[in-house]
Amino acid sequence: MANPIESDPHGFRRRGVLFVLSSPSGAGKSTIARKLLADEPKLSMSVSYTTRAPRPGEVDGRDYHFVDVDRFREMASNHEFLEWAHVFDHRYGTPKADVFHTLSEGEDILFDIDWQGAQQLYQLAGGDVVRVFILPPSMAELRQRLERRATDSPEIIEGRMARAEREVSHWDAYDYVLVNDDVEECFRSVKTILAAERLKRSRQTGLIGFIRGLIK
């Protein structure tokens, strides 16, 4: 049986999806995003601009566009971002350039952003946006995951936990909400959502011509 995620066998053109994944830090969003990108050839990651310094192994232009605060402010004032937000004393923004062209070509873009960014993106791009929020099975489990990573000080972990509670309170601003108590099961659910959204009638831009051909 054909995979519904692949291109339509009737050759319908479709508009792409702005696919948003959000979650508290430690809930598994980044793991699922990496798996999705590896599994979906028509999906690419949105490369954000940020004012934070590169981490070991990160490459400018691949992981992020690294800029100073003055350059970021200039871009924001020139309305060059689809969305931007402060996260842990740094700024992150999604550039408008090429996004809508990519959508018109039937390619999808993955966004790893918080609820504020998702809200801004939805206000600007509306029906192109699909928002998925990933919850931890419990706040106790979230804390344990952050501690097991051993990358943050106790103070930073406390800050992340406080932020997590604020983020979870915005769950109802999303189209889909999943609980990540099993990463493989959660990943399969995310893939199912993407497949269904790609097949929505509103995104099948070639459907009208096909229908006219049937009833002429």
Image (tube, helix red, strand yellow):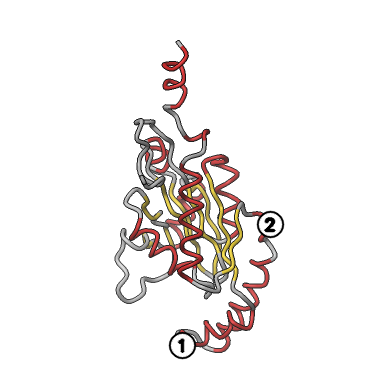
How many badges with numbers are in the image? 2
Compare residues 181 and 14 and report the one nearer the observer. 181
Q: Where is mark 2, residue-wise?
A: 172
Q: Residue drawn at (61%, 51%), measured in percent from left and top?
A: 175
User: In the image, which disc is placed on residue 210?
Assistant: none
How dense is the environment of label 2, judged by Cα within 10 Å: few (below 14), some, or many (20 and up)? few
Expressed as whole percent of the image width and height from the top left, the position of residue 131 reads 56, 53
Q: Residue drawn at (30%, 73%), measured in percent from left and top?
A: 57
Q: Amino acid at mark 1?
A: Ala
User: In the image, which disc is placed on residue 150?
Assistant: 1
How dense is the environment of label 1, judged by Cα within 10 Å: few (below 14), some, or many (20 and up)? few
Secondary structure under the numbered disc 2 in the rendered image = helix
Sequence-first tag of 1 and 2: 1
Asked if the residues shown at circle 1 and circle 2 are in contact, with their CB atoms under 8 angstroms apart, the answer is no
Residue 28 vs 117, above or below: the answer is below
Say left or right for 66 vs 149. Answer: left
Residue 211 vs 102, above or below: the answer is above
Compare residues 150 and 116 and report the one nearer the observer. 150
